[in-house]
Image: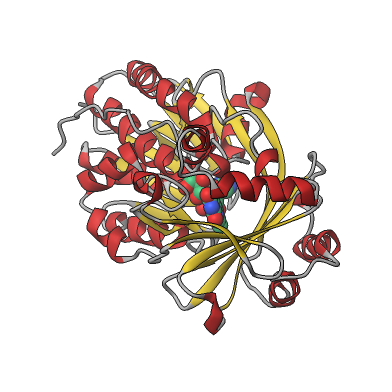
């Protein structure tokens, strides 16, 4: 097989995972990350099915288990703190809200970086700004002014991937799910405990507080809204938007908004999916959220990144011609991605009712969720369909 140099943009999950497997297949990965350092933020991400199998093949499954947040389950509460429904992490066979294998996104990213940094060139604080396809290679220009040649380029820079947009232009569809979510870390209170707590508020809003393994609490505030470009506003304006949107609500809201003021990892996103007709063009491909973000509503983002990286590297390792490898990557992975992106109808509106009566119905349904026949319907919402995917085996060094 040719020993290719592959430049990867993005050092979160998909980028370092791809670097790991490319090295195993005898290639030279170079990862360029726009931020000056590895990004630490984010909540717990679930690792399921084929994603878990990839971590096993990478030899990191037990490290992930050791870095688990130890979340024992999730409770749905009213604003007065009364539990309306609860699911332990064992509910739905360990495949529901809380999975058996979970870790903070930032911890997983750091673990993948540690596992790859000796065999991968990492460049922080820079990004690809121009891509020129020349006979037999790519010539890449970087924002810093640097230039370099590469055999291939892979966009692993997330849902708003600029690298993808440089090459694939407007063929990408970003499909909004009508929801904004803010993630941030707040101080842990003694009453926070080891269960996640989910509170609904009229107007299609929710607050979730989740324990982590670092002595803090992870907050997630969501509200239904058509796209308004809030994710592109300066951070202070975004925080003001959250204060305005949640003003007047009780329960955990005053505390969460108060502590949001001083958090240093605030991140507001428009919840959306990425759909691309093709995941490669010439010598450039895309992986992870950049190519097929399924949105946090799917519970599958990290799995798609891990599995996509494994398959892309595996196909490159077993094909001389990158065009054949890219075609095989799509053929193998498309069905898995399609399953993950196929969210149940009514998502996310059903989980964020606009009225108190709707919230009461949601709580009643959740209370009945483990009893047949309701469990069959609720399962469709809580357990991603993507458990049945069998990983191809690729010979590695
Ligand atoms: C800070 C952060 C917090 C997150 N929190 C959560 C969460 O709480 N829950 C959840 O379900 N998902 C979260 N996600 C998304 C989650 O990581 C992904 O859905 C999934 O793991 C797939 O990862 P990815 O590597 O494809 O993309 P991402 O995780 O989005 O990573 C993309 C990486 O590319 C970098 N980047 C962006 N633009 C460029 C560029 N032009 N050049 C080079 N690098 C670039 C970004 O800084 C980032 O490191 C978060 C992502 C980030 C970056």
x%, y% of residue 20?
29, 46
Q: Residue at x 26, y 52 (%)?
A: 119
In the image, taking residue 228 as reference, residue 216 lies left or right, namely left
- The colour mode here is secondary structure
In the image, taking residue 43 as reference, residue 234 lies left or right, namely right
x%, y% of residue 121?
35, 52
Q: What residue occupies the far bottom of the structure in this picture?
A: 190
x%, y% of residue 277?
56, 18
Q: Residue at x 31, y 18 (%)?
A: 321
The image quadrant that residue 197 belongs to is bottom right
In the image, taking residue 62 as reference, residue 226 lies left or right, namely right
Q: Is residue 289 above or below residue 37?
A: above
Q: In the image shown, does 204 or 291 lie closer to the viewer?
A: 204
Q: In the image shown, does 322 or 106 lie closer to the viewer?
A: 106
Residue 119 in view in this figure: yes
In the image, taking residue 335 as reference, residue 239 lies left or right, namely right
x%, y% of residue 272?
65, 38
State the count of labels.
0
Residue 142 in view in this figure: no
Q: In the image shown, does 190 or 332 lie closer to the viewer?
A: 190
Q: In the image shown, does 138 or 265 lie closer to the viewer?
A: 265
Q: Quadrant of the N terminus?
A: top left
Q: Residue at x 65, y 70 (%)?
A: 81
Q: Is residue 334 above or below residue 180?
A: above
Q: Quadrant of the C terminus?
A: top left
């Amino acid at each position: 097989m040719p020993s290719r140099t592959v430049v990867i943009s993005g050092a979160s999950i998909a980028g370092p995972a791809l670097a790991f497997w490319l090295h195993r297949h005898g290639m030279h990965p170079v990862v360029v990350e726009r931020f000056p350092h590895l990004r630490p933020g984010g909540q717990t991400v679930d690792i399921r099915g084929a994603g878990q199998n990839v971590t096993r093949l990478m030899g990191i499954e037990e490290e992930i288990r050791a870095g688990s947040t130890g979340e024992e389950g999730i409770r749905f509460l009213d604003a007065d703190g009364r539990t309306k429904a609860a699911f332990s992490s064992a509910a739905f066979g360990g495949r529901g809200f809380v999975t058996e294998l979970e870790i903070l996104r930032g911890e997983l990213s750091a673990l993948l970086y540690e596992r790859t940094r000796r065999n991968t060139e990492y460049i922080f604080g820079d990004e690809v700004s121009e891509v020129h396809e020349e006979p037999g290679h790519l010539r890449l220009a970087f924002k810093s002014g640097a230039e370099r040649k590469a055999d291939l380029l892979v966009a692993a820079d997330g849902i708003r991937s600029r690298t993808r947009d440089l090459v694939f232009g407007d063929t990408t569809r970003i499909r909004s799910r009508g929801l904004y979510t803010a993630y941030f870390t707040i101080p842990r209170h003694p009453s926070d405990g080891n269960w996640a707590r989910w509170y609904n508020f009229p107007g299609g809003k929710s607050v979730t507080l989740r324990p982590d393994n670092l002595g803090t609490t992870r907050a997630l505030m969501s509200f239904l809204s058509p796209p308004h470009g809030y994710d592109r506003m300066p951070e202070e304006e975004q925080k003001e938007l959250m204060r305005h949107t949640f003003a007047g609500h009780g329960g955990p809201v005053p505390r969460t908004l108060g502590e949001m003021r001083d958090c240093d990892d605030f991140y507001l996103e428009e919840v959306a999916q990425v759909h691309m007709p093709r995941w490669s063009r010439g010598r450039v491909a895309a992986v992870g959220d950049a190519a097929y973000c399924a949105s946090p509503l799917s519970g599958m983002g990290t799995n798609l990144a891990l599995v996509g990286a494994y398959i892309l590297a595996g196909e490159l390792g077993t094909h001389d011609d990158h065009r054949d490898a890219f075609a095989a990557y799509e053929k193998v992975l498309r069905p898995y991605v399609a399953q993950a992106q196929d969210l149940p109808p009514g998502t996310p509106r059903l989980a964020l009712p606009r009225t108190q009566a709707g919230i009461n119905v949601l709580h009643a349904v959740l209370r009945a969720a483990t009893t047949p026949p309701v469990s069959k319907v609720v399962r469709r919402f809580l357990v991603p369909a993507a458990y049945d995917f069998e990983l191809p085996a690729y010979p590695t060094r």
